[in-house]
Image (tube, rainbow, N blue to C red):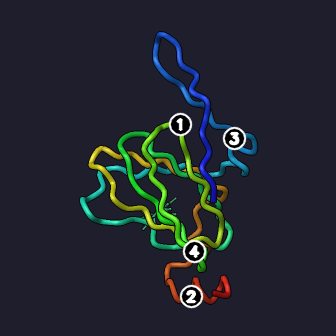
Amino acid sequence: MSIIKHRILGDHRGQLVAIEGQKDVPFEVKRVFYIYGTQLGVPRGQHSHHKTQQYLIALNGSCKVTLDDGKKKITYDLNQPNIGLLQDALVWGTMHDFTPDCVLLVLASEHYDEADYIRNYDDFLKVVGA
Ligand code: T46
């Protein structure tokens, strides 16, 4: 679980941020998805993955992400398009407090596979031995 700040490659035309798999994030990027149009007060996520690592960036607006490894919970503010949060496998993630304009980009280390999800918190605690 770590925050990564990316260099902004800006010039008089505007800003650009480049993120390369296995360089700027510690995995090969196999999947990209994004969340927007979230409802006020409605959290997303609330699950963990057996294998998938994720990297989250609020491209627009802001949200909070609470990561829980079974022992400790830390809440991060994502509010800049050049700052991302690494969510390791076997970490329970909850995305919440989205601003209405939030676009949350997620880079993932694996293709989508529902079998990789742990969607029950008690099962998660058993898997991590907490
Ligand atoms: C996460 C947060 C931020 C797919 O078909 N392919 C995909 O790659 C994903 C991520 C989802 N789906 C399907 C599965 C469900 O039928 O899209 C539907 C909504 O997925 P889910 O309920 O998992 O959505 P969130 O917003 O609760 O969670 C998603 C990711 O699953 C999760 O890993 O960190 O976004």
Residue sitting at x 58%, y 50%: 107
Bin the neighbour count of mark 1 within 10 Å (Cα to Cα): few under 14, some 14-19, many 20 and up.
some
How far apart are the two marked residues, 4 and 1, measured between alpha carbons?
Answer: 26 Å
| Numbered circle sitting on residue 20 | none
Q: Name the residue located 63 percent from the left edge and 60 percent from the top edge.
A: 1
Pair 4/3: label in front: 4
- Residue 100 image point, x, y percent: 27, 49
What is the CA distance from the residue labelled 4 to the residue labelled 2?
17 Å
Does label 4 or label 2 sit earlier along the sequence? 4
Q: CA distance from mark 4 to mark 3?
A: 26 Å
- In the picture of the structure, the residue carrying the numbered disc 2 is 123
Q: In terms of depth relative to the viewer, which is nearer, 71 or 101?
A: 71
Residue type (three-letter) at the residue carrying disc 3: Asp
State the CA–CA distance, disc 3 to disc 2. Answer: 32 Å
Looking at the image, tell me whether mark 4 or mark 3 is earlier in sequence order: 3
> Is ligand 1 within 8 Å of the beta carbon of the residue shown at mark 1?
no
N-term-proximal mark, 4 vs 1: 4
Quadrant (top left, top right, bottom left, bottom right) of the C terminus: bottom right
Q: Amino acid at mark 1?
A: Asn
- Give the spatial CA distance, label 2 vs label 1: 34 Å
Give the secondary structure at mark 4.
loop
Which of the two marks, 4 or 1, is nearer to us in this view? Answer: 4
The amino acid type, in three-letter code, at marker 4 is: Lys
Q: Is residue 95 left or right of residue 109?
A: left
Instruction: Identify which residue is drawn at 51% across, 67% down.
Output: 93
Q: 25 or 130, which is in the foreground?
A: 130
| Residue beneath disc 3 | 24
Which x, y percent locates residue 104? Answer: 43, 49
Residue highlighted by disc 1: 82
Residue bearing the label numbered 4: 72
